[in-house]
Image (tube, grey):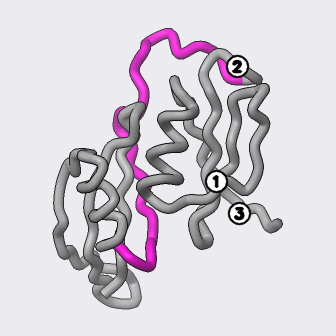
Amino acid sequence: MRFNALIPELGVRDLGASLEFYVGLIGFRVAYDRPEEGFAFLECGQAQLMLDTIGLGRSGDDASGRLGGGINFQLEVDDLDAIMRRLEDAGWPIALGPETRCYRTPEGDRCQRQIWVRDPDGYLLRPFQAI
């Protein structure tokens, strides 16, 4: 297993609900976990993400009770339509999209189809497929 240079770790309230979202709906897989600590390491293509249950293991309690504010995670996927179907079948709300956006980069415009969806703790995920 190769670890990326930057791997976000999200504090979550309910690991089971987060796994249903990230694995069941978005398409991540559990690379490994430590259930006794409420921890799971997830992968989706080259993306890696850690989930850590607040109050277990080494995470502290979130005193504010607010999670997910002010951040979004862009995730490149192979099949955005399949994710949208799973979300729709589960009755999971899409915050924005689907939309097609082009972003200026040093190499020119990069265009993609994307949606914006919140996980159970309010973290904003932006799955996209390059076009």
> x, y (%) of residue 41?
69, 48
Relative to 64, residue 23 above or below: below
- Mark 2, residue position: 56
Residue nearer the viewer, 2 or 13: 13
Quarter of the rendering occupied by the N terminus: bottom right
Residue lying furthest right in this view? 1
Which residue appears at 60% of the width and 47% of the height? 8
Q: Secondary structure at mark 1?
A: strand
In the figure, residue 50 lies in which quadrant? top right
Mark 1 or 3, which is nearer the eye? 1
The reply to whether the magenta stretch includes residue 92 is no
Residue lying furthest top in this view? 63
The disc, 3 or 2, on the residue closer to the chain's N-terminal end is 3
Side of 72 where 1 appears, left or right: right
Which label is found at residue 42? 1
> What's the CA distance linking mark 1 and mark 3?
12 Å
- Amino acid type at mark 2: Leu
- Secondary structure mostly taken by the magenta-highlighted segment of the chain: loop
Circle 3 residues within 10 Å: few <14, some 14–19, many ≥20: few
Side of 32 where 48 appears, left or right: left
The disc, 1 or 3, on the residue closer to the chain's N-terminal end is 3
Circle 1 residues within 10 Å: few <14, some 14–19, many ≥20: many
Which segment is the magenta one?
59-80
In the figure, residue 66 lies in which quadrant? top left
- Mark 3, residue position: 4
Circle 2 residues within 10 Å: few <14, some 14–19, many ≥20: some
The reply to whether the magenta stretch includes residue 74 is yes
